[in-house]
Image: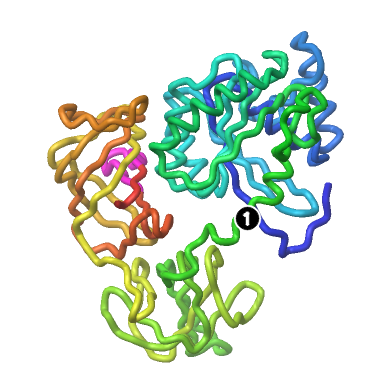
Amino acid sequence: MTNLNQDTELLRFTTAGSVDDGKSTLIGRLLYDSKSIFEDQYEQIKATSEKRGEEGVNLALLTDGLKSEREQGITIDVAYRYFATPKRKFIIADTPGHIQYTRNMVTGASTANVALILIDARNGIVEQTRRHSFISSLLQIPHLVVCVNKMDLVDYSEEVYENIKDEFSNFSNKLDVKDIHFIPISALKGDNVVDRSKNMEWYDGQTLMHYLENVHIGSDHNFIDCRFPVQHVIRPYTDEFHDYRGYAGRVAGGTFKKGDEIMLLPSGFKSKIAKIDSYDGELSEAFPPMSVTMLLEDDFDLSRGNMIVRPNNQPDVTQDIEAMICWFNEKPMQFPRGKYKLKHTTQEVRCIVKELRYVLDINTLSRNQEDKSVDMNDIARVALRTTAPLFIDEYRKNRITGSFILIDEGTNNTVAAGMII
């Protein structure tokens, strides 16, 4: 295992693709070839592979953690895996390919810097490829890597790879993705995953691991618009901290420095930052995605759900929200006037569905305005009205203040994820 210093940059990436495209094998290969698994883990999956009569070691078993997944050989839940190289730390969200688990893909992708879209070289682009690529673009994942997998099963054909690349490029013109990268790989054999392939001399690009270690993610966060949703008020009430009153939370945007003039929402009062505390002691500044406690120069009554911003750079304060939603629940969305609980940053309010603008056809990306039902896995544009004002930004501007979830009040289930337009 690699020794790390605390400052190594963390890259979050998600894997998506249709069933049996080789996502779990690819992650297993990354972990194994980067020497990020323990010997006993390797021995255990080697024994399981032999027991199942498989040729070689099935690296997919490394990530398929649930017993039912191992038995069926598929991924059901979002499995998070952590590994590291001397250059970077990584968190992988291995998400399921089945259409009924689209919600898991949304969960895994919501915080990712990079999405790996796997395509089986034999099958080319299928509906799930389009669905997952569109969701990646909807979730504004900054970098998309299209891994054309199982190249060993098409004799490492450059022509097959180029055809898939052209078809995907044509489709992706309709998507809102700025950075798309293509790599021909064989997760099973290890071609172009960590080590360069000797079977594809015609490919002169980088390996997947080289890409993941070097892709620039420093500007993926919003460091301009200052947003600090208050999560908790800290009052220790001890002799040592008798007058301590801090506001704890996670920086959602911008850079806050000691002495900065700030404004409190919803009250509109202004103050200055007296001090920024963290787990490791006092800081001179805080930026996303740091968790800190802010102390202000004046005594104001702030509580959970309030927000600290800059006087000259404020979010929209509104009760009317336009959003794209991805519906997760088997029970269709109630419309019109369906009532739900809405959770946005640290605020919880109730809302009604005011209007259903359209449901999206995932294959053509055309808008269906006739269909007035939103079923499981559907992506739709809606207008919502909330019972109290929210402090929002457009999702494309800030993934934290621009997103929310809808909760069914009766069952407490999360029924949708929303991206504010």
Residue 269, compared with residue 306, is above or below; it is: below
Foreground of the two, 292 or 140: 140
Residue 321 drawn at (x, y percent): 23, 54
Question: Residue 246: within the magenta?
Answer: no
Query: Within the image, what quadrant is residue 38 found in?
Result: top right
Q: Residue at x 39, y 90 (%)?
A: 298
Residue 374 drawn at (x, y percent): 25, 31
Foreground of the two, 228 or 194: 194
Residue 155 drawn at (x, y percent): 72, 14
Asked if residue 122 can be seen in this view, the reply is: yes
Residue 354 shown left or right of residue 330 in the figure:
left
Query: Within the image, what quadrant is residue 54 found in?
Result: top right
Residue 172, compared with residue 210, is above or below; it is: above
Q: Residue at x 80, y 40 (%)?
A: 34
Residue 170 shown left or right of residue 311 in the figure:
right
Residue 26 shown left or right of residue 94 in the figure:
right
Asked if residue 67 can be seen in this view, the reply is: no
Does dot 1 land on a helix, a strand or a loop? loop
Identify the residue under disc 1: 216
Foreground of the two, 125 or 62: 125
Query: Within the image, what quadrant is residue 320 found in?
Result: bottom left
Q: Residue at x 32, y 35 (%)?
A: 379
Q: Which residues are magenta?
A: 405-416
Total number of numbered discs in the rendering: 1
Give the crowd class for mark 1: few <14, some 14-19, many >=20 residues within 10 Å.
few
Question: Which amino acid type is shown beneath numbered disc 1?
Answer: His
Residue 40 drawn at (x, y percent): 84, 32
Q: Residue furthest top?
A: 53
Residue 398, compared with residue 34, is above or below; it is: below
